[in-house]
Image: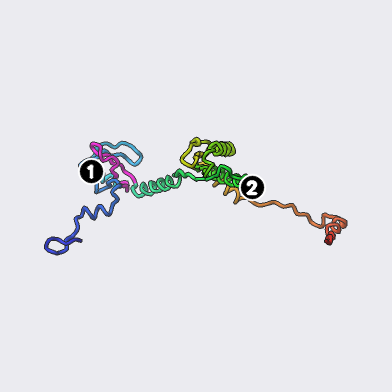
Amino acid sequence: MSRGRSGHRTARPKSIETAKEHDISDPRINDRIRVPQVRLVGPNGEQVGIVKIDEALRLAGEVDLDLVEVAPMANPPVAKLMDFGKYKYEAALKAREARKNQVNTVIKEIKLRPKIDPHDYATKKGHVVRFLTAGDKVKVTIMFRGREQSRPELGYRLLQRLAQDVSELGFVESAPKQDGRNMIMVLGPTKKKADARAEQRRKREDAKVGPGEDGAVSTDTVSTDDLSADDVSADAQTPEVAQA
């Protein structure tokens, strides 16, 4: 409701209320199709031909389906007989599945010093391996300080060594280049993100199942009836613990 010039409340136009009831992106259906005639398509894709809108609505009512305008810009517009509720539901499922499978490019960053010690290098390399395995790109940055800036070959050799160590999982997407006090290299994963996720999902499922076909760990049990008296007594003996 809104107020007119006289101050009294006036009803909103029906067009505004109708627009709120229907999504703007939705096609026009049934009585909302305001054209004299349409090119009608049957529920199985068969071509019915050009019919008057009243006739098309009558046919839709006979088969308990909706008349949906699928090509409004055609001359005349094309309308199809379908279950519009089912159509929207299936379209929503497809959109949700597409969003689930959508992969965003992620760039991880690892920073190294040109004179990094072996233990720290192994740790940093482990991070790079984990990122590449997950299908992410890795930006490797060598940070130079002080006199290290006069020895850029140290950083270059370190980046080459790292690229060689992880060559089975990634490749050099951007070769090492100097950027001020830093030297930067970008590694790309050999596996796509979607493939890496699928493989990780399979590994998690296999880990839940465990060994064996049915997930049960088989153990062999032996009854004491199958053992001789000497075997039983031998098993029952407890070895002495040496005193310090």
The magenta-colored residue range is 62-82
Is the Cβ of the residue at disc 1 closer than 8 Å to that at disc 2? no
Quadrant into which the N terminus falls: bottom left
Secondary element type, mark 1: helix
Mark 1 neighbour class, 10 Å CA radius: few under 14, some 14 to 19, many 20 or more: many
Which amino acid type corresponds to the residue marked 2 in the rendered image? Glu
Residue 130 on the magenta span: no
- From the viewer's perspective, tell me whether residue 5 is left or right of residue 223: left
Residue 53 rendering spot, x and y as whole percentages:
23, 43
Residue 65 on the magenta span: yes
Instruction: Say if 174 sits above or below 102 in the image.
Output: above
- At 78% from the left and 54% from the top, the residue drawn is 222
Q: Quadrant location of residue 148?
A: top right
> Residue tagged by mark 2?
213
Secondary element type, mark 2: loop
Q: Residue furthest front?
A: 147
Residue 89 rendering spot, x and y as whole percentages:
38, 49
- At 24% from the left and 48% from the top, the residue drawn is 32
Question: How many angstroms separate mark 1 from mark 2 (CA)?
Answer: 61 Å
> Residue tagged by mark 1?
53
